[in-house]
Image (cartoon, helix red, strand yellow):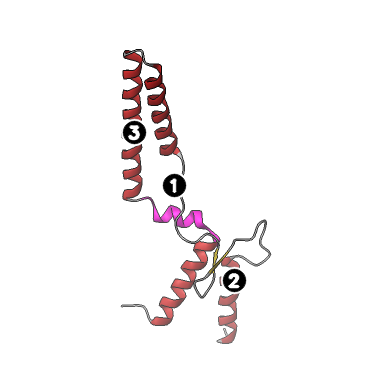
Amino acid sequence: MPLSEYEQRVLEQMERQLTSDDPKLVNTFQGGGTRTVKRWLLTGAGAVAGLTVLVIGAATSQPLVGVLGFVAMFASVVLAFSPPRRKGPAGIVMENGATRPRPKGRSTSPGFIARFEQRWDRRRDERGR
């Protein structure tokens, strides 16, 4: 059974709010997918290529080639273990889809769950429990 238009809007609003409140949780559920595998393969190939150039530089007694190989290998390993860049809006997503910068420090407004509970209590009160 498909969702009604109202239910779809509420679900989209909850998703936007969750994205702005806890981006780490959203990233955990979205996962890396094929980009993570591709990233590991590319950085692994870069590390192997850097190691190969390092060994060639050492075998031919050319320190500059060895240093370049080490730099390439080191950069590949650093890239492999650095966190990927975040996608999506940087800040708080508002109801109209626009974003505003996330405030520094602790927010004074209630969190997502608290607002959700307040709305739930209001609906229950309106219906007469």
Q: Label 3 sits on what residue type?
A: Gly
Q: Count numbered badges in the picture.
A: 3
Check if residue 83 falls in the magenta segment.
no
Q: In which image quadrant can residue 7 be found? A: bottom left
Q: Tell me the residue that label 3 is attached to.
A: 46
Numbered mark located on residue 50 in the image: none
116 over 19 or under it: above or below: below
Q: Tell me the residue that label 1 is attached to.
A: 84
Q: In which image quadrant can residue 113 be found? A: bottom right
Q: Secondary structure at mark 3?
A: helix
Of the image marks 2 and 1, the number of the one nearer the N terminus: 1
Q: Label 1 sits on what residue type?
A: Pro
126 over 71 or under it: above or below: below
Quarter of the image where the C terminus is located: bottom right
Q: Are marks 1 and 3 in contact (CB under 8 Å)?
A: no
Question: In terms of secondary structure, what is the magenta stretch mainly?
Answer: helix
Going 39% across and 29% down the picture, which residue do you hit? 73
Question: In the image, which is nearer the foreground, mark 2 or mark 3?
Answer: 3
Looking at the image, which is closer to me, 38 or 116? 38
Check if residue 22 falls in the magenta segment.
yes
Instruction: Determine crowd level at label 3: few under 14, some 14-19, many 20+ residues with C-alpha closer than 10 A.
Output: many
| Bounds of the magenta segment | 21-32
Q: Tell me the residue that label 2 is attached to.
A: 115
Question: In the image, which is nearer the foreground, mark 1 or mark 3?
Answer: 3
Give the Cα separation between the discs numbered 2 and 1: 31 Å
